[in-house]
Amino acid sequence: MLRSTIPLARQCRKVDWGPDIPRKIQTILFKPSNGSLNKQDSAALNACFMGNLKEPPKLSYKERRYIIDFLSDRRAYPDLNKFGRRYLYSQERLYDFVDKVSFIELRQYLHSLLRTKNTILIDQLMSKVIAQFSITQKEAVTNFINSAYVLLHDEAKQEKWLDPTEPLVKWAKWMKLLNGHCNFTDYTHQRKLLKTLMFTLRESRDNEIEIFQKSLDIIKTAQGVSSTSQFASTVIYLSTHNRSFDLAEAIWDYKVENNLPIESSDLTCILKCYCHFKKYNLVEPTHSAYPEAQDEHSQFDYLLIAHSKLENWSALRDQFNALFNIGELPNIKHYGIVMYSMATIGELENVEKLYAQLLRRDMLPTYAVLQSLLYAHYKVGDLNACFAQFELFDKYSIRPSSSTYTLMFKVFRGLSNIEGALRLLKRITESDVSLISETHFALLIHMCAKFTNPLIAHELFHVMTQHYDIRPTSRSVAALMDVYIESGNPEKALSLFNEYNRDNIEGRISLFNKAIKAYTTMGDQHQCEVLFGKIVKLKLANDSEFFNVMLRYLVCLKRDYDSAERVIDQMLNHPTIKPDVTHFQVLMDAYDKISFREGIHNLYRKMNENEIPVNSKVLHYLIKATFKVQMRSQGDLEQSIQLLDRIMKNAAERTLDITFGQLHPSIVAWPMRAVAKYHSPMKALDLLNHYSHLFYPKEDFSINSKFTVMRSLLVVSAEIEQWDEFDSIFERYIARAEALMKAPSATTRNKKLNSLFKGLLVYKVRHLAATEKIYLLPDLLKKLSSEGYVIDNLSWNEAVKELFQDSRTIESGLQIINEKLIHGFNLIHKYRLLKRHAEETNSANRSWLLRQKKADPKSFQPTLYLSAETYSKTMEYMDRYLSSLTDLEGTLRTFIKDYPYFMKSYLMKPRTHINGWDKIEADHASYFAALRQSKRVTLHAQF
């Protein structure tokens, strides 16, 4: 208590009290705070300052400020009311405030009026503040109004006496007094005006719609139709901006029912609401009903979305063509609608024809026309051409919309160009920050999942919430969770789930989906089932992604493929959620891993029967399964090659129902490698040329820089032993990888690049051996390992065999075996020996290793091990090498010391093929006897 009185005492000492202030009053003001003011002190202060004195004591600013603080701290609100009326208002100028009055004093006075339920005086106070300070201190007045609104709002929440409509009604009144209107529909530029109202909109309240509608009724009675319409427009805009679509639609209905004027922003917001609620059939009639509120730039996106979702292509096309026959030529709006409809189904050729036609008619393109061109190129997968279409907006001085930028962010995502996407974000910020939405940030954040870069993703999320003041919904939170999952940190994703999993977050099911994905990644079947149970308990509406994670859970954790197929069958009969290509893709991926080729073909057949568009991944599994079946049964790949050619041709000619116009290079990459190995390397090159001809213009060489294509070219050139070509491509491959690792956005390592050299190094080893440069191999292996790249077991074994054949590199081979391969080799052979022994003696439970393998068959399976062939070859090469040495004993001693685990295996039996070995055996008989009996590395023994 003593400590808390020190600041007050110091402040009191700083005030130089005038002679009019009695010593008794000073003593009262000096008393430490005990939470309230007693009656005697209150009476004394009232008599001194608020009594019926002709000449009350004159107070300086510091004295007045101190007394107001004193009364406020002690919650003496009636006394503060009297003091404020006497000392804050000028006695000479009626109803004016005194000179040097501060907003802090006015705010404390306002608070005292509210605590004493004196709302009439609050209105008078606010009106006077606005009248006296609106010209000279408008920003301060705005803040004062917002602080008053917050006080009223909090009071209405906590106390029953204040109606919850009161804060809203007064806010509208005061803002109109200050600005001449209360219609605010640009949060970016009017944030200071709207931020407190926005914060209260973000709260989840009971009867929210009813409160706002009742507020509008009161405003209409007290302030008139104009203020009602303006405030309604503000609420519609803010609630849409806040994604409170139910409230926005209810206020729109209120305006329509009461014949209030419809503003352009109102119409834009309701079209957005209808698209959100999938009421596409209401979009066009609503837009047409209010021509005076139409704004093509901001509303046409929703019209286009509605037309495309309703999928009435033929009616649109027929209506458009009929205009030529009845003597009325299509106007530019007709072009925009039809072009966008054609773009939605990937009719790029027709879109470009219509564009050329309107230019020939000397028409200037509109936003809808340019948006259609951009979308058409995106839809067919011509991503590089999208940049040229985007520049047309500048050429014709047409401002892009938020959805235009969304498309461009998707283009950058398709090109895996995070740097370009970040530059675009900066460009939008500099031109019109109001166009930036959560969707843009969600796309950017999700791109980071591909690069496994949680640092940039987290920073983007922070910038979105703090700098752009965008409230995160499940869209952006789920995107960030996905980044953490893909980056190998599912625990961080789950912490986000726990932080944002609230009743009022929109799209809550998306958070559960990502949480289930995180637990699936962690292999936690129990927690997945707990979350499935919570989804049922909370009655969350399932979405397409929910079934996706359920399928992944079934095939990855439970290995229950029959149940997974039944889920897809149930979706085919679901009234609202139909399976798409991603659901089949999950199951196909699982079947590919277990080599169930027939299952892949059956799933593809089911997709065709139900007219479900395919994508590149599904086609990849189909082609791979077909090749594998034919390789196993016939060995001849001609039929599979013909199938691949037919698929590529149909996709290019748009006769194959695919989700994206341009097939991914993986379609041809895996078959190229298979054909090069088992059929004809030249035929493999023909496949790549066919793919390039169908999907890439002649002048576009970007395909040559794609990893999937370069991998295939490496295999082909190695199979035909074109080593110069192989070396050139391999150098480009490494340079491309290094460029990605050194990119400005590569603040953390991209874990998905770790497997770049998996399956390739075996060819590089052969290349170095064929060109007699095997001495370069140790440094290459060391470099790739240190940089985190995965080197597969086959490549290690191939490297060891070649290193052992050269006396200059044999020790590098010994080191690799000793550190990486011999342990796996020993484990495999120990398990086989124990298993065989257990079968012969019926004693499986005696071995700890066998018990562990029985409990978990996947345990103790080494990924790196010396193959039987490599083991045999290295023993042979080791014998040959040691036979060539003059100091055999000294070399053996060094090898036993430096590479003990390999040398134990090597010395388990006499090396009879080495010259002079009999003498070595005789000289070190006790060492060999101990080694072969204990089967342990005896480092302490002397050789």
Image: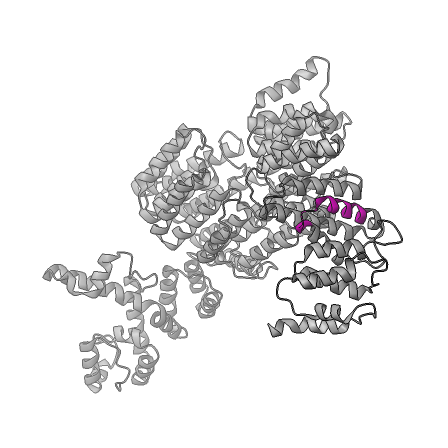
Which sits in the foreground, 422 or 681? 422
Vertical side of 685 occupied by 855: above or below? below
> Per the image, is 194 magenta?
no
Q: What is the x, y in percent for residue 407?
A: 62, 41
For the C terminus, the quadrant is bottom left
Residue 722 seen in the current view: no
Residue 766 visible in the shown view: yes
Horizontal side of residue 557 vs 469, given as left or right: left
- The vertical placement of 367 against 473, above or below, is above
Q: Quadrant of the N terminus?
A: bottom right
Q: Magenta segment: does it hold 122?
A: yes
Residue 885 position by quadrant: bottom left
The residue shown at (61%, 21%) is: 316
Q: How many marks?
A: 0
Q: Position of residue 580 (x, y in %)?
A: 45, 35
Horizontal side of 620 relative to 130 (left or right) equals left
Q: Main secondary structure of the magenta part?
A: helix
Q: Residue at x 66, y 20 (%)?
A: 320
Q: Position of residue 420 (x, y in %)?
A: 64, 51
How are the colours assigned in the image?
one colour
Residue range of the region highlighted in magenta in the rendering: 114-130
The image shows residue 875, relative to residue 91, as above or below, that is below
